[in-house]
Image (tube, coloured by chain):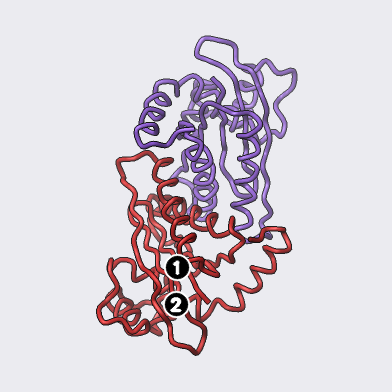
Chain colours: A purple, B red
Amino acid sequence: MRVLGVDPGLTRCGVGVVDGAPGTQLRLVTVDVIRTSPDDDIGTRLIGLERGLEALLDAYRPDAVAVERVFSQHNVSTVIGTAQAGAIAIACGARRGLPVVLHTPSEAKAAVTGNGRADKAQVTSMVTRLLRLDTPPKPADAADALALAICHVWRGGAQARIQAARMRQYGVDR
Amino acid sequence: MRVLGVDPGLTRCGVGVVDGAPGTQLRLVTVDVIRTSPDDDIGTRLIGLERGLEALLDAYRPDAVAVERVFSQHNVSTVIGTAQAGAIAIACGARRGLPVVLHTPSEAKAAVTGNGRADKAQVTSMVTRLLRLDTPPKPADAADALALAICHVWRGGAQARIQAARMRQYGVDR
């Protein structure tokens, strides 16, 4: 199973693709950050992000997309940009008939470190270890996207199958 | 100038198209509500909304899109759905190279009633009068989308031209 993890953001959107299955060794496929400029208007930024995601989906053809669920605890102005970027990622996956599943940051942290409140260093350290990388993934702030993808490989199997069945039922398929 | 106004929402997204120019009589082209089911997953809902908006853009070919700016005063869970739906509307317009401008609810209310705190009945009444309709527009909750479109016809001219120039500069054009 190949999963694209997306840590949504307008200025920096972390993206990571991981191959794996529950009980088998995980493999890093790619990791990156899609950037859009705060100087551009929101339309230009959202389609810039969309193009980046489409290119990634074309190049790596994941089986599922895991997007970080927007956290209502955040301050509201951050939430708006994150929700907008997340909507683009969700739509890009759903438009291709891919199962799109949302995981909270705590779920992703708990999946890779065993602790839903783990700090960034701990998440990066475990992602590096789980993917058997020689050095921490770069860009560093894309580690959360990899944690989401790993979380989904381990937790999301059943959920993804249910969603895929629902998408087919609604005639949304590749 | 033909403007598509969008009052974004996941369950009900108000859409209205208006023809007009500053100083000339306004004309209603179409008004509707695009609905998606709260029972569906977020991916299905966002692409359902996207399809509805694309069909509208194909059918009526507006020159600009006016989307309600998400209000940070709202409660956060409402803000997330509104921001997600708004992002889809913004991306649909921007992808076609259309100028996309955001107006706050107060700006739209002030444009049609002279009062940024006008209530729904007052907005509906003025939209009905300004468009010279015999009866209030239906569905009733799409009146805000028409107010946004009218607001943009009257206020948005200069802003839209600047944005269109920026979009062309970035190579995003029809």
Residue toward you, B4 or A171:
A171
Which residue: 68% across, 60% down? A39
Dot label at residue B5: 1
Q: Is residue B134 above or below residue A115?
A: below
Q: To which residue does mark 2 refer?
A: B150
Q: Is residue A125 left or right of residue A100?
A: right
Residue B136 in the image: state x and y as whole percent: 27, 76
Labels 2 and 1 within one chain = yes
Visible residue check, residue A103: no
Q: Is residue A1 above or below residue A79?
A: above
Visible residue check, residue A26: yes
User: Callout 2, which amino acid?
Assistant: Ile
Which residue: 37% across, 62% down? B14
Q: Is residue A112 left or right of residue B109?
A: right
Chain hosting mark 2: B
Q: Toward which corner of the image does residue A156 lie, by quadrant? A: top left
Q: Toward which corner of the image does residue A119 lie, by quadrant? A: top right
